[in-house]
Amino acid sequence: MAVGQNLDVSKKLKAAIKAKLEELGVYVDDELPEYIMVMIANKKEKNQMKDDLNLFLGKCTNKFVDWLVFVIYL
């Protein structure tokens, strides 16, 4: 995959993450989707993501991370 294609995929994934967070009713700023993208780039395990995001997402953490893992590994 070319660099331009990777950038396009990253932008689409970040937009999808932001939309899902908004759908779940979670406060979203520009930093949270970026933080999640860094976790993906660092290949964090599902349980690590849940632990790291619980402070921000609370009761929505499991639902969000399950969705995220599904989207990433389609």
Image: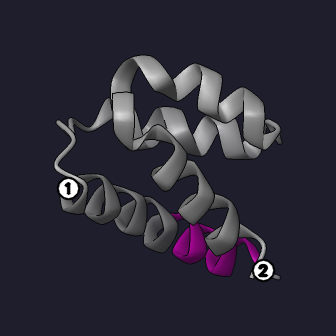
Looking at the picture, tell me which residue is in the foreground, 45 or 16.
45
Scheme of image coloration: one colour
Looking at the picture, tell me which residue is in the foreground, 70 or 62.
62
Residue bearing mark 1: 22
Q: Residues within 10 Å of mark 2 (few under 14, many from 20)?
A: few
Taking the image as shown, residue 58 lies to the left or right of residue 61, namely left
Looking at the picture, tell me which residue is in the foreground, 49 or 32.
49
Q: Which residues are magenta?
A: 2-10
Label total for image: 2
Farthest residue to the front: give it. Answer: 59
Residue type marked 2: Ala
Residue positioned 75% across, 33% down in the render: 47
Q: Which quadrant of the figure has residue 6?
A: bottom right
* Type of secondary structure dominating the magenta stretch: helix
**Relative image position of residue 1 (x, y in whole percent):** 82, 82
Mark 2 vs mark 1, CA separation in Å: 30 Å
Taking the image as shown, residue 42 lies to the left or right of residue 4, namely right
**Relative image position of residue 34 (x, y in whole percent):** 45, 39
Vertical order, 50 against 12 (above or below): above
